[in-house]
Image: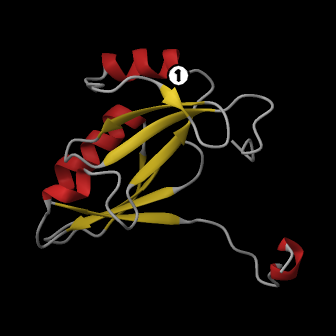
């Protein structure tokens, strides 16, 4: 079928991503300090649950998990594996994040759809990456 055959009548947009954590409070603080997230909601309970708004408009729900698997750090494991954060300049973003304590262990690589990417991990080892899109990239979409 042609892509236009799949048009939806409902209005969909990504509101938030759920992130199960070993220590939700510490992970929340990492996202606030390192990525400039803003606390939107705190359930005030034990275990805690937080909604954070990250620059760009998507929220992250951080809540207590029951267990962790080392394999989730492997970007080739099936399922949701990373969150990509669009930036204007990889070099500028890398320098700012390094100043906030982020350690980069990989080199810059080409991005699928054009541009460049650079992976890093949050305080609990969850994968994130910066993505810088070239002006002629078919994946430029909204930033």
Q: Which of 37 and 134 is in front in this view?
A: 134
Q: Is residue 34 above or below residue 72?
A: above
How packed mark 1 is, by other alpha carbons closer than 10 Å (few <14, some 14-19, many 20 or more), is some
Residue 1 percent across, percent down from the top left = 83, 81
**Name of the residue lying farthest toward the bottom:** 9
Disc 1 element = helix
Quarter of the rendering containing residue 66: bottom left
**Relative to 100, does residue 34 appear above or below in the rendering?**
below
Q: Position of residue 99 (x, y in %)?
A: 32, 16
**x and y, in percent, of residue 17 in the image:** 44, 63
Q: Which residue is drawn at 51% across and 41% down?
A: 85
Q: Name the residue under label 1.
A: 90
Residue 3 falls in which quadrant of the image? bottom right
Closer-to-camera residue (44/138): 138
99 vs 11: above or below: above
Residue 32 appears left or right of 20 = right
Which residue is more in the foreground, 116 or 57?
Answer: 116
Residue at image location 15% in from the left, 70% down from the top: 47
Identity of the residue drawn at 24% across and 51% down: 73
Residue 54: tell me if it is visible. Answer: no
Does the image show residue 72? Answer: yes
Q: Which colour scheme is used?
A: secondary structure
Q: How many labels does the image show?
A: 1
Q: Residue at x 41, y 14 (%)?
A: 95
Q: In this view, does 42 lie above or below 129?
A: below
Question: Where does the C terminus fall, quadrant-wise?
Answer: top right
Q: Position of residue 56 (x, y in %)?
A: 59, 45
């Amino acid at each position: 079928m042609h892509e236009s055959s799949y048009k939806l009548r409902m209005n969909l947009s990504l509101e938030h991503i759920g992130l199960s954590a070993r220590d939700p409070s510490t992970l929340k603080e990492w996202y606030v300090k390192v990525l400039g997230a803003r606390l939107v909601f705190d359930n005030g309970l034990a275990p805690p649950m937080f909604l954070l708004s990250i620059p760009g408009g998507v929220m992250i729900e951080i809540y207590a998990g029951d267990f962790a698997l080392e394999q989730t750090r492997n970007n080739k494991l099936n399922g949701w594996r990373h969150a990509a954060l669009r930036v204007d300049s990889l070099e500028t973003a890398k320098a700012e994040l390094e100043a906030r304590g982020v350690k980069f262990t990989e080199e810059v690589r080409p991005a699928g759809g054009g541009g460049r990417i650079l992976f890093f991990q949050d305080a609990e080892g969850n994968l994130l990456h910066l993505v810088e899109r070239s002006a002629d990239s078919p994946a430029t979409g909204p930033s």
